[in-house]
Image (spheres, rainbow, N blue to C red):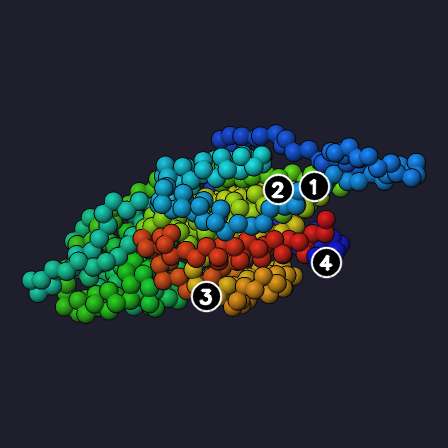
């Protein structure tokens, strides 16, 4: 509570609001509806004389009028983790998987929007879309020595479609100038990841006569990726272990049945924005604070921790902050389509005008905070320090600064940071059910919702002086 509003401006004002960053995902926005509910909030009169309820026989010995006593404004409610957990049960148990572009994502959006409306926030549901890659049955089947084996792999974005059976041929990393013309004629090139882009590998293999390309990973993990643009080549990625297997088969003149059958589908989705305008603005364009988290889940599971946990903290903060920070405009945002590439947040930032961007003094992102022992804070140094201070006030246990690699790109704060806006990212590691069907509501520890909610309040209390 001690930091002056001055610091708020100095730490996070115009100087940091650059627009140098490039936002990678591109979403196409159109305004579906701006369901604006006019704020019915009225400012409490502060100098009305208290009404005396019971007449009293005692006559005051003096005619001096009583000083006006202010009508007490009810204190803001406390963050209630049980209220937050009830919202979570709706999102996770009643609605379930919230894959962007599906009716369930919209159902969840409706639920959040209706809740924001019930709090008398102004709501917005700007419609956006993104391109999603559909795999209708790509695959690899090997035949060597009379035996066949299915190999697991996935088509790269911008691969061309094909169904062909041809011999496999090793092509190293297919670096520029390493392949002789015609050396891969009519073959399926087996290429190791590394050195140059996937697209350049595919181009080099094509120039050497290859008709299709398999790229295997040079480290653990699946190889999913993009060619960036159409280079006229079918390309499938496989993991390192499958790559090693294929190398052996290549030495045995194995034949490969190679199928790429992909399509791009446009999917619609929306963010859900609840705005609490400044109640007593000090200027026509008061400062804006954004508190957000994504409400979509991966297709594989109902995303209780990732990220119903963050969503419901945002919802509960919207309730408890209704009358707080009256000079500031608060925006509570549930972002859509995060799991397919931060589309909702990227879209939101892209559509902020320069003037709007300059008003945004901070963006707090809450993503995956109800499972795991350590709570991480990442982003703007001033905000991270406030989070540490808040955490010790609320007794949050093990807290740590987040590794920079995670701050940079893994969730919805990233597009804001790239636009020069100060961000604070809350996240807990160690979720064994991350992106699994088992990320369910029974794994959620409600007190963790309360802890993060209260740290957010402490951070903003310190960041803004009323
Ligand atoms: N909730 C995660 C972000 C996350 C995961 C933060 C693990 C820290 C550790 C988020 O929903 C997610 O899965 N993000 C993707 C990237 C995104 C651009 C699709 C990720 O981290 O792989
Ligand atoms: Zn997430």
CB at mark 1 closer than 8 A to ligand 2?
Answer: no
Alpha carbon separation for disc pair 3 and 1:
38 Å
Please name the residue that numbered disc 4 is placed on: 3
Within 10 Å of the Cα at label 2, are there few (<14), some (14-19), or many (20+) other Cα atoms?
some
Verify CB contact (< 8 Å) between mark 2 and mark 3.
no
Residue 19 visible: yes
Query: Left or right: where does residue 198 sit relative to residue 68?
Result: left
Please name the residue that numbered disc 1 is placed on: 73
Of residues 357 and 188, the one nearer the viewer is 357
Q: Earlier in the sequence, mark 4 or mark 2?
A: 4
Looking at the picture, how far across and down is residue 84, in whole percent? 48, 48
Query: Left or right: where does residue 311 sit relative to residue 67?
Result: left
Alpha carbon separation for disc pair 3 and 4:
29 Å
Alpha carbon separation for disc pair 2 and 3:
30 Å
**Closer mark to the observer between disc 2 and disc 1:** 1
Q: Which mark is residue 322?
A: 2
Looking at the picture, how far across and down is residue 148, in whole percent? 11, 60
Within 10 Å of the Cα at label 3, are there few (<14), some (14-19), or many (20+) other Cα atoms?
some
């Amino acid at each position: 509570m001690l930091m002056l509003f001055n610091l708020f401006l100095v730490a996070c004002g115009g100087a940091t609001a650059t627009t140098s960053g490039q936002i990678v995902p591109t979403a196409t926005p159109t305004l579906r509806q701006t369901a604006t509910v006019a704020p019915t909030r009225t400012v409490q009169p502060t100098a009305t004389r208290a009404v005396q309820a019971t007449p009293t026989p005692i006559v005051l010995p003096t005619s001096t009028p009583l000083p006006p006593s202010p009508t007490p404004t009810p204190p803001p409610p406390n963050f209630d983790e049980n209220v937050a957990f009830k919202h979570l049960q709706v999102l996770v148990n009643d609605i379930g998987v919230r894959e962007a572009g599906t009716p369930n994502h919209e159902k969840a959006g409706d639920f959040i929007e209706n809740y924001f409306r019930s709090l008398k926030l102004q709501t917005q549901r700007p419609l956006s879309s993104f391109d999603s890659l559909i795999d209708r049955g790509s695959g690899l089947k090997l035949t060597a020595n009379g035996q066949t084996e299915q190999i697991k792999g996935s088509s790269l974005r911008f691969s061309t479609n094909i169904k062909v059976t041809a011999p496999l041929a090793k092509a190293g990393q297919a670096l520029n100038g390493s392949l002789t013309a015609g050396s891969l004629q009519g073959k399926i090139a087996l290429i190791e990841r590394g050195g140059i882009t996937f697209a350049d590998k595919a181009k080099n293999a094509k120039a050497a006569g290859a008709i299709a390309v398999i790229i295997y990973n040079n480290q653990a993990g699946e190889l999913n990726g993009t060619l960036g643009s159409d280079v006229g080549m079918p390309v499938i990625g496989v993991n390192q272990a499958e790559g090693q297997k294929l190398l052996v088969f290549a030495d045995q003149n194995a034949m490969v049945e190679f199928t790429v059958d992909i399509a791009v589908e446009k999917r619609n989705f929306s963010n859900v924005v609840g705005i609490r305008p400044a109640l007593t603005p000090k200027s026509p364009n008061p400062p804006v604070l954004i508190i957000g988290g994504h409400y979509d889940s991966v297709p594989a599971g109902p995303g209780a921790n990732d990220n119903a946990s963050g969503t419901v903290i945002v919802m509960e903060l919207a309730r408890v902050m209704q009358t707080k920070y009256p000079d500031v405009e608060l925006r509570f945002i549930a972002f859509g389509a995060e799991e397919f590439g931060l589309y909702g947040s990227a879209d939101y930032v892209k559509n902020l005008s320069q003037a709007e961007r300059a008003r945004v003094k901070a963006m707090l992102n809450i993503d995956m905070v109800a499972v795991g022992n350590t709570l991480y804070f990442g982003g703007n140094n001033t905000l991270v320090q406030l989070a540490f201070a808040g955490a010790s006030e609320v007794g949050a246990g093990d807290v740590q600064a987040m590794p920079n690699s995670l701050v940079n790109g893994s969730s919805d704060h990233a597009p804001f940071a790239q636009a020069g806006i100060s961000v604070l990212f809350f996240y807990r590691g160690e979720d064994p059910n991350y992106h699994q069907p088992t990320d369910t509501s029974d794994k959620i520890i409600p007190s963790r919702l309360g802890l993060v909610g209260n740290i957010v309040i402490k951070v903003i209390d310190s960041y803004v002086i009323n």
